[in-house]
Amino acid sequence: MICLGIESTAHTFGIGIIDSNGFKVLANEKATFTTNEGGIRPIKAAEHHILFFDMILQKALESAKIKLEDVDLIAFSQGPGLGQCLRIGAVAARTLALGLKKPIIGVNHCIAHVESGKITSGFKDPVTLYVSGANTQILALASGRYRVFGETLDIGIGNFLDSFGRVLGIGFPAGPKIEELASKGEKYLELPYTIKGMDFSFSGILTKVEQLVKSKKYSTEDLCYSVQETVFAMLTEATERAIAHIDKEEVVITGGVASNQKLCGMLKTMCSERNVKFAAVPRPLATDNGAMIAMTGILMHKAGLKNKISETNINPYQRTDQVDVVWCK
Ligand code: AMP
Ligand code: MG
C-alpha cells in the first residue's frame, strides 16, 4: 500500500510518500516558512502553504516515481497546531481523497513524531523525548495511550530557542544557528535550572538570558553555550528520571530539536551509563515532515481506522494523551 501524508501544522508544508512494505520512504518533500528576523505569523505561514502545495506535490510524486493514481491512502496532520495552517493541509487532503476516491485518515502530529522514531529505531516500547517547536514531552505507552510522564510547564524547547534567537536577532528557526554559535562558546554563565520532578519550564530562563544579552557584557557564543548546557541538562535529567520510574530500556529522541548533536550526545551518555538503548530519529524525519504522517496513517489504517469526510475537521488543541493508540498491541 502507498500512503501520501500531508503535514501543515505550523511552519512546514510537507508531503511524504511511504510504501507500507517496510515503511520505505519513497518521497519526503517540504517547504518551510522562514524569516530573517522575527517569528512566525500564522496567516503568513498559511499563505506559504497554499503557494507551495502544488510544487511540493509534484516534487514528491517525481521523487517517488509514482502517479497520483498509485496512492492508496491519504493521511494528514489533523492537530495540534495553528488553525490557519492546519486548515490548508486538511483541505488539500480532502480534495485529494475525494478526487481520487481513496480513504482519508487524520493523524495526531505529535504521535506521528513518536511513531516515526519507533519505526526508524526499531524499538518496541521506548520512552520518547519529543522536542519540537511548540511541544516538549516525555512520552511512553501505558494502557493504550501515549501518556505524558513529563512536559514543559510553559513554552516548548524549540520555541524557547527561537525566542532566544529573536533576542539575538538571528531569525527563524534559531535552533541550528544557536547550536553552531554554542560550539564556539567556552565560558558557562549560570542560568536558572527549572525542573520539577519530570516537568520543566523555560520562560524564566528566557527572561534571564534576555537580561544578559541586553547587558552587552557577554559574548553571543558564551550565551548560546550556557543556554544549551542548561536546558539540555534539564531534559536529560527528566528523561533519566522517567526511565528509572517506569522501568523502560529504550530511549528515542524525536522532533526538530532532535537534530541537535549536543542534546543527542548528552542523552547517549546518560543512556549508556544506565545500560539503556538510545536512538535519534534521522534528520529528514526530525523537523516537521509528511513522511511521518504517512507512516502513522499506515499504522492506523492497518488497525482498521478510517475517517468519513465529516470527521476530518482540524483539531488544533488535541493532546497526545487523548488519542487511543489502538494500533499498538
Ligand atoms: P518541529 O516543530 O518539530 O518542526 O521543530 C522545529 C524546531 O526545531 C524549531 O524550533 C527549530 O529551532 C528547532 N531546531 C531545528 N534544528 C535544531 C538544532 N540543530 N538544534 C536545536 N534546535 C533545532
Ligand atoms: Mg512537530
Image (cartoon, rainbow, N blue to C red):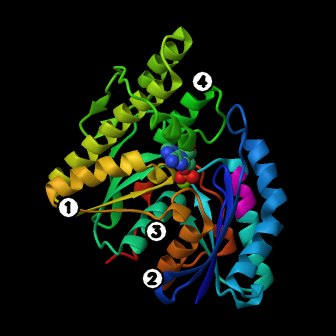
| Residue positioned 51% across, 59% down in the render | 286
Residue on which disc 2 sits: 303
Mark closer to the chain start, 1 or 4:
4
Residue on which disc 3 sits: 116
Please state which of residues 270 and 202 is positioned toward the viewer in this rendering: 270
Q: Secondary structure at mark 2?
A: loop
- Image quadrant holding the C terminus, namely bottom left
Q: Are marks 2 and 4 in contact (CB under 8 Å)?
A: no
| Label 1, residues with CA under 10 Å away: few <14, some 14-19, many ≥20 | some
Q: Are marks 4 and 3 in contact (CB under 8 Å)?
A: no
Q: Which mark is residue 276?
A: 1
Distance between the alpha carbons at the discs numbered 2 and 4: 46 Å
Distance between the alpha carbons at the discs numbered 1 and 2: 30 Å
Which percent across, then down, holds residue 119?
41, 74
| Residue positioned 43% across, 45% down in the render | 136
Distance between the alpha carbons at the discs numbered 3 and 1: 20 Å
Instruction: Reply above or below: 255 against 64.
Output: above
Which percent across, then down, holds residue 226?
39, 28
Residue on which disc 4 sits: 167
- Labels 3, 1: front one: 1
Label 2 is placed on what type of residue? Ala
- Image quadrant holding the N terminus, namely bottom right
**In the figure, is residue 248 to the left or right of 56?**
left
Q: Are marks 3 and 1 in contact (CB under 8 Å)?
A: no
Please state which of residues 55 and 316 is positioned toward the viewer in this rendering: 55
- Labels 2, 4: front one: 4
